[in-house]
Image (spheres, rainbow, N blue to C red):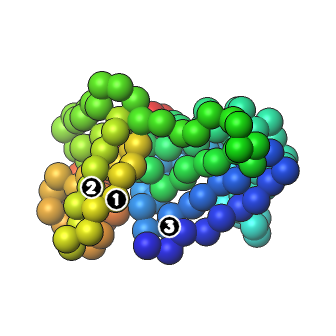
């Protein structure tokens, strides 16, 4: 997976384009930090590190993650208990301590949007290319 890192004085934001389904929670909430029309599109020093961490934790796909530069600061953790939310026309929204096995490789995560229609090109993740895309544009 191709992960890009955006370094700030207090926080680093990691972005995995292969996981992004453009729910746009980040750009709607802190446009000074997250602006897809700008390069680089993430400017961690343009906002408060705690607010950025809060918004990143709301990214439903798990495309965004963060790490504070202060080694003593709390690390991102999954919600407990782990939850799976679903509704008609939406992917499976998973939040918590998640272990994902893909092509025989395991990795831990805190959030994921999993495909439920089978039309994704990025299995098991939703890539918003299938018929289950009526959720798009709805705030999460």
Residue behind mark 2? 100
> Which quarter of the picture shows residue 10?
top right
Residue behind mark 3? 17
Identify whether 65 is placed above or below 53: below
Q: Residues within 10 Å of mark 1 (few under 14, many from 20)?
A: few
Residue behind mark 1? 107
- For the point 30% across and 25% down, which residue is it? 81
Q: CA distance from mark 2 to mark 1?
A: 5 Å
User: Percent position (x, y) of residue 40?
Assistant: 75, 67
Q: Secondary structure at mark 2?
A: strand
Please state if 140 lies on the left or on the right of 34 as rendered: left
Quarter holding the C terminus? Answer: top left
Q: Secondary structure at mark 1?
A: strand
Residue 62 in view (yes/no): yes
Q: CA distance from mark 2 to mark 3?
A: 17 Å
Instruction: Give residue 137's mark.
Output: none
Quarter holding the N terminus? Answer: bottom left
Q: Residues within 10 Å of mark 2 (few under 14, many from 20)?
A: some
- For the point 64% across and 48% down, which residue is it? 67
Identify whether 107 is placed above or below 72: below
Q: Nearer the viewer, mark 3 or mark 1?
A: 1
116 and 103: which is toward the camera? 103
Q: Residues within 10 Å of mark 3 (few under 14, many from 20)?
A: some
Q: Earlier in the sequence, mark 3 or mark 1?
A: 3
Q: CA distance from mark 3 to mark 1?
A: 17 Å
Q: Nearer the viewer, mark 2 or mark 3?
A: 2
User: Percent position (x, y) of residue 128?
Assistant: 34, 59
């Amino acid at each position: 997976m191709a992960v890009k890192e955006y370094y700030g004085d207090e926080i680093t934001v990691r972005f995995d384009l292969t996981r992004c389904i453009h729910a746009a929670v980040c750009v709607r909430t802190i446009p000074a930090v997250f602006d897809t029309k700008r390069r680089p599109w993430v400017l961690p020093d343009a906002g408060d590190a705690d607010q950025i961490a809060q918004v990143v934790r709301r990214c439903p796909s798990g495309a965004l993650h963060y790490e504070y530069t202060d080694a003593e600061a709390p690390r991102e953790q999954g919600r407990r208990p782990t939850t799976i939310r679903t509704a008609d026309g939406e992917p499976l929204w998973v939040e918590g301590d998640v272990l994902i096995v893909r092509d025989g490789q395991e990795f831990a995560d805190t959030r994921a949007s999993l495909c439920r229609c089978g039309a994704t090109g990025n299995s098991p993740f939703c890539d918003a290319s299938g018929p289950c895309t009526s959720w798009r544009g709805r705030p999460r």
